[in-house]
Image (spheres, helix red, strand yellow):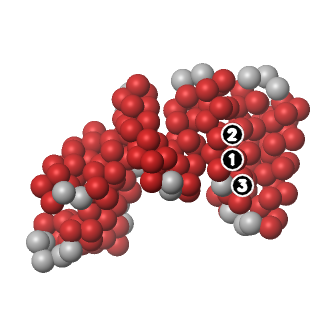
Amino acid sequence: MSARGGELKDSLWKVWYDDSFHSERRIEAITNLARNHYIVKGSADSGLILANLLDVFSNQIDSDFGRERAISLRGTAYFYLENYPKALSQKLILLKIYQDRGAINDEANIHEWIGLIYYTQNNFEQALLYLNKARRLVPERASGFYSNLGSIYRDIGRPDSAISLYRKTLQIIKTVPDKYVEGSTYLNLGMTYL
């Protein structure tokens, strides 16, 4: 890890342990630590411990915001730990919360997560169902959803549908740039032609 990354990690720990910071800042710090410094970098079990720590803290201060973050982190950690039933359970809890609140963007994100959980388990029918729900909820973010849908069609042996969706993704990216989705779409398109 670079010195800069270590400094950021240390500063996040300082915020978490300093009671003088507002509770939402502390929640953001532990969320960032769990997701960006542990879960995504290969220590999902440590991220899970931090998610549970966040849940305890959130219950002590009665913070729905913190509890939602803890649920999300747990779902993500379980996904990276390949415990898909538990990942799905956490994401479904979060989906209900967001649906009740009418938080469309958050709901779309969770539909996408659920779709990816099913996709990872080769349950393509459910993956398509949830990814299409996400696409319909926020059509302005459709490029990523179309790219993910293309990958599913590629994997179920429907390359023509996959290519069509990848091309649609690239068309959308011309008006709503997204370098990450663009790069992964070109990669997936190339793999589909192989």
Q: Quadrant of the C terminus?
A: top right
Which is nearer the N-term, disc 2 or disc 3? 2
Please give the residue where the numbered disc 2 appears in the rendered image.
132
| Identity, as a three-letter code, of the amino acid under mark 2 | Asn
Residue contact between numbered discs 1 and 2, judged by CB atoms under 8 Å: yes
Report x, y in % for residue 46: 25, 44
Q: CA distance from mark 2 to mark 3?
A: 10 Å
Q: Residues within 10 Å of mark 2 (few under 14, many from 20)?
A: many
Q: Residues within 10 Å of mark 1 (few under 14, many from 20)?
A: many
Question: Quick check: 5 left or right of 18?
Answer: right
**Where residue 83 is drawn, which disc sits there?**
none
| Identity, as a three-letter code, of the amino acid under mark 3 | Pro
Please give the residue where the numbered disc 3 appears in the rendered image.
139
Q: CA distance from mark 3 to mark 1?
A: 5 Å
Instruction: Answer yes or no: is residue 42 visible.
Output: no
- Residue 104's place in the image compared with 160, above or below, is below
